[in-house]
Every structure is written in structure tokens, then in C-alpha cells.
Amino acid sequence: MKWAPKAAPAPVSVAQRKHAARSKRSSAGSPVVEIREEKAPPPLDDYYNAMFTAFGPQHWWPGNSRFEIIVGAILTQNTSWTNVERAIATLRSAGMLTPKGITAAPLARLERMIRSSGYYRQKARKLKEFCAFLQRQYGGSLKRMFDTPTILLRDQLLGVFGIGPETADSILLYAGEHPVFVVDAYTRRMLARHGWVNEKAKYEDIRWKFEEQFPGDTRRFNEFHALIVNTGKHYCRTQKPLCGECPLGRYLEDGR
Ligand code: SF4
């Protein structure tokens, strides 16, 4: 489509301005700005490649079994991974790192075992509630649970006490290899700072940005989330982000 501006032109994007610079002139010599849809590479793909090139594979999620990953996903809420590792090591050495072990343990003992992970009373209850769900719905079988279609299982997990979207998606992706994307505070902050979403965007809207661009790509979701966490920890801090050193700094052009 061609148009010749008569009045002040409407604001255009950086891509449009670059394209305009390459536009032709009309036979009368007046500038004719040709605005075309430019097929840019998928921007999120660029983000992924930049982080992967900088950091390499992240080998997530750390854990020796699917149940251990689930326990980690629940315990990591509002605490550092170091604290979670201590709690998991304590459970393992007590022989309690199984659905049966968690179910059989008296609540007070379980609380003591996971104390290092913080909010230990709530988290002990969450672990027990998950194990009760697993037993009630799937006879205790993680295989049967993860053989369930993603949408159905996600709904069921969200119905378990203490399992919100981020935890449910972590369980689905990292323990069950289901194709869902995990959104966390790092993801939200990074996307907001790059102008993709506003700070208050809904979890599901952010998730969809990734899932619509890489549908069904479980391996990509696995690595992408881990790379974002790494970027968030080392560069995209709440205060004073290190954009000049960050592998995503080049995408902050245009005044953002
Ligand atoms: S540190 Fe800067 S460049 Fe890196 S992700 Fe955060 S806002 Fe983007």
C-alpha cells in the first residue's frame, strides 16, 4: 500500500522508519513512503537465541525423580533454591521423598523436615494435599497422572490446595514434560521492561505469548524459562538492572 503524507504523519515504528529511509521517490520527485509489513524473525526467538548463546543449556529442572521435581516446585515458592535443596536433602535422608513417605509422615515431623524452605507449615500441608490428590485421582501413580491430557491435568492441579499457575506449570513442564510455559516474576519483569506487557498483565496472557509462538515445543519451554531465570538472577535485578552487560541489552533500543 502506498500513501503520500499531506499532514504530519502518524507515529511509526522503528522498523517502519528504517523502511521509509529506503523508500523510493515518485516521478515528480516528492517522497513516497512505502509502508509494508516486514517479516521480522520471531522476536521471542531472538531473545531465546541471545540467552542460549550467552549461557548455554541450563539442564533444568534439578531433581533425581519426577516426584522430587514436584516437591521442589512446591517448596520453591517464596524462597531461594538453596533453602529448597536443604529441605529436599533432609527428606531424602529420612526416606520420606516419596508420595508414601510424605503421606505417612506426621504433619509436625514433615514441617520440621522442610523448615529450611520457609513457610514450612503451609508447605507441609501443600505436600500432603498433593499426595492425597495423587492417591485419590490416580491411585498414587505419577505415570497415570502425567498421561492425562495437559488441559485436564492442569485444571486438576490448580484445584489442589497451594498449587497456583506457576507451580502447576512447573510440575507439568519439568516433571511431566507437558508443553506449557512457566511464567515467573523474572519473566514478567523482563517482558515489562522490554515493552511486551505491562507489569500487571495476567499470568495466562503472558503464558500465551510463548505458547502461541512455539506451540507444543516442550524442550524450548524448558530451556527458555531456565534461561530467563538465569538472566533475571544475574542481570535483570529489581533495582539497577545490568542492561549494559546483559545478553538482551541490544533489544532495549528505541528508548525503553
Ligand atoms: S537487564 Fe536490562 S537488558 Fe537484561 S533483561 Fe533486564 S531489562 Fe532487559
Image (spheres, helix red, strand yellow):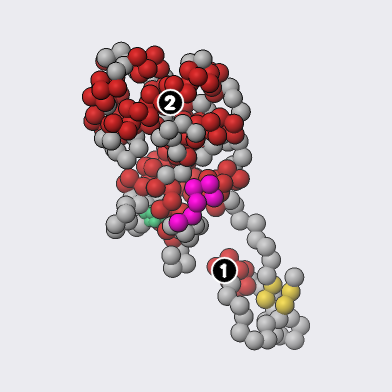
Q: Tell me if mark 1 has few (under 14), some (14-19) or many (20+) residues whose alpha carbon lies within 10 angstroms of its own.
A: few
Residue identified by numbered label 1: 13
Query: Where residue 161 appears, x then y in whole percent?
Result: 43, 33
What residue lies at 50% left-to-right and 33% top-to-bottom?
A: 159
Query: Where residue 144 appears, x then y in whole percent?
Result: 55, 18
Quarter where residue 100 is shown:
top left
Is residue 238 located in the magenta-colored stretch of the structure? Answer: no
Q: Earlier in the sequence, mark 1 or mark 2?
A: 1
Q: Determine whether 4 is above or below 52 in the image.
A: below
Is residue 204 located in the magenta-colored stretch of the structure? Answer: yes
Query: Where residue 48 appears, x then y in whole percent?
Result: 49, 45
Q: Secondary structure at mark 1?
A: loop
- Res 233 seen here: yes
What residue lies at 62% left-to-right and 80% top-to-bottom?
A: 9
Residue identified by numbered label 2: 130
- Res 223 seen here: no
User: Nearer the observer, disc 1 or disc 2?
Assistant: 2
Check disc 1 and give the amino acid type: Ser
**Quadrant the N terminus occupies:** bottom right
Observer-nearest of 227 and 188: 188
Residue 118 disc label: none
Q: Tell me if mark 2 has few (under 14), some (14-19) or many (20+) residues whose alpha carbon lies within 10 angstroms of its own.
A: many
Q: Which residues are magenta?
A: 200-205
Check disc 2 and give the amino acid type: Phe
Residue 61 as seen in the image, left or right of residue 137: left
Residue 240 as seen in the image, left or right of residue 195: left
How far apart, in angstroms, are the residues tagged by discs 1 and 2?
48 Å
Q: Secondary structure at mark 2?
A: helix
Q: Quadrant of ligand 1?
A: bottom left
Q: Determine whether 73 is above or below 10 in the image.
A: above
Query: Where residue 177 appears, x then y in whole percent?
Result: 52, 28
